[in-house]
Image: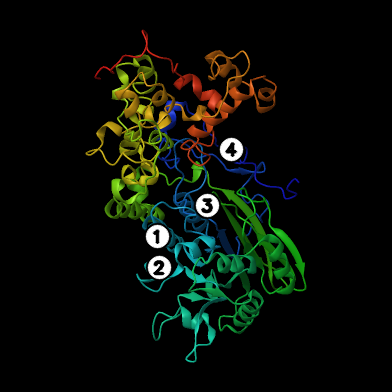
Amino acid sequence: MSDPIPRLNARATVSRLFALLGFGAVLAALASGTAADPPGAVPKETLVDGKPLFADWPKDQKPDAALVLTGQTFGYLQPCGCSRPQTGGLERRAYFIDQLKKKGWPVAGVDLGDLYPEKVAVREQGTLKYVAAMNALREMGYIAVGVGETELKGGLDELLGNYIVQKEQPPFTLAGNIVGPGVDATGKPVLFPREQRFRPGAGKRPIVELTEVADVGGVPVGVAGVVGNPLAVLAREKKFDTSIDFAKPQDALVAARDALAKHPKKPRLNVLIYQGSMADAQNVAKNFPEFNVILCQASDALPPLKPNYVNTTAGTTAIVEVGHKGQHVGVVGAFKKPGGGFELRYQLVPLGEEFNQPGTDAEALQKNKALQSLQWYAERVKKDIVLGKDYPRTLHAAQIHAAELKPKGVSLRYVGAEACKACHQAEYKKWADVDPDEKSLAHSHAMKSLEKYAHRPNLRQFDGECVKCHTVGFNHSTGYEDEKKTPQLKNVGCENCHGPGSGHVADPKNKQLTELLSQWKQGLAPAPGQNAIRLPDKAFMEKMAKLGPEERGKMAQPPATQLLINRVSAMCMECHDHDADPHFDIYKNWAKIGHSGLAPPGGWPAVAPKP
């Protein structure tokens, strides 16, 4: 069933687009889609649905208050940057907010939550991401942030402790219906109220609150936070954190409404951080018209162009979704009406490269507080997390299968591309020795792109989340550890696709060990009349590269061959995924990396020559 809500067109929103770089040059573009503009470059205007930002807002009037709405960042602090253009990142968000403030707009931020990553290899790294994000939000002027599923999975007490331990400071965490299960003096199960469960000490405010009120340009803005029932039930059933439970959302909503109404600052604009779906948020809007804006969970990574407006007894409530991974922000402008109240306007903003902080890296770091938080994060990762020790490793599929071969006990190790060179000279030249002058920074120079070109922040050669795609076998046993222990596995080489090659190097004529180097062919049988299952020739791949999706579907291929193409593409996309390289296309790139895979001239030697 099609989505009835008009959503952002990911390919056509930002007018300033950069051409897709070649496969080797993809690495040259690294680190950042956060690279600063070339000297003299003039930022171009951002277009959303064909219109400039804020085109429908009053031209001769500044908003009395502007609220930047975000959520579900999932630990994406900056775009990966391995190809361009990419959207998102805290640097761009901070620069965008700064530009609004320079226009004379009073600005504050509200975040739904889910700052913590959905998946993280090292728990401590996830905590560092959370703290870096919270520090950045504080510097941007955020009032409050909610509690999402990822914070519950990541350990809410630990996360809040690592941030609040610095000092009591915004953004304040709001989740009004969170409670603590326990037993009373008689052993009877009870629920300790939020104020008791999250009070750090006498005289201090609870580290999880129900509401917060802040002055935004003279407008008192009230913010409340509530976790919806579906997330509460999920957290309880999956036992995300057995020291936490949730009271009924309805009761918390009533308490929040009443607390804001009685607040001495008398908030005139109320925002609800609601960790629940759009459908549930619509019901909340109807039952609690006192909330002018509701920020709820996004059902899709690409957000709707406009809020969902719900007519209530008090006027209209705007229900906002802002998508995933911090790629977009929503801006609500509140304009005072002559008869009282506010007229609300909304603008969705994709954070493209035009919002990179201008200037050199040093200048940007000095001006952009979010970048300072990111640099702190990178330095802490280098200091606290050891590449070859702290990141988990698993056995490669070839290592598992090799142990089952007869005679049993075959143990495969990664050996590096140089060990393949003597027999596979043509393939080595095509793949591992491309462009030795490093102009394109192809696979054979992949780590140097982290060391020399990754910036905002730098030091990413010490971050396993980056290193895993710039070295050989980082995620697997005997793979890359660091440049001193495993220098032969630095950069991307033959074994990134073929798996650990020690068995084939030691016994080139062993058919079983050779077959382990083509894991993507396992279980595929050649079609009738087909001698072997192989990828199509270069001419076919180049032809397909020029076709669109519909035309490609009309090109006949044996099922086994198409499955092989899909498997190889999926393997490439373990690194060239939608986050790191959203433009990756196996057909367009294969001509640059494709190689024969055939035995060397004269057949396999009895013993592989030394490289």
Viewer-side label of 1, 3: 1
Q: Amino acid at mark 3?
A: Gly
Q: Can you tell which mark lies on residue 127?
A: 1
Q: Amino acid at mark 4?
A: Ser
Distance from the alpha carbon under mark 4 to that under mark 2: 42 Å
Q: Is residue 388 above or below residue 258?
A: above
Q: Nearer the viewer, residue 532 or 552?
A: 532
Q: Nearer the viewer, residue 584 or 508?
A: 508
Q: Upstream in the sequence, badge 4 or badge 3?
A: 4
Q: Can you tell which mark lies on residue 15?
A: 4
- Identify the residue at horizontal 71%, vertical 48% (top origin): 6
Q: Amino acid at mark 1?
A: Thr
Q: Upstream in the sequence, badge 3 or badge 2?
A: 2
**What secondary structure is marked by label 3?**
loop
Residue tagged 3 = 326
Query: Can residue 437 be seen here?
Result: no
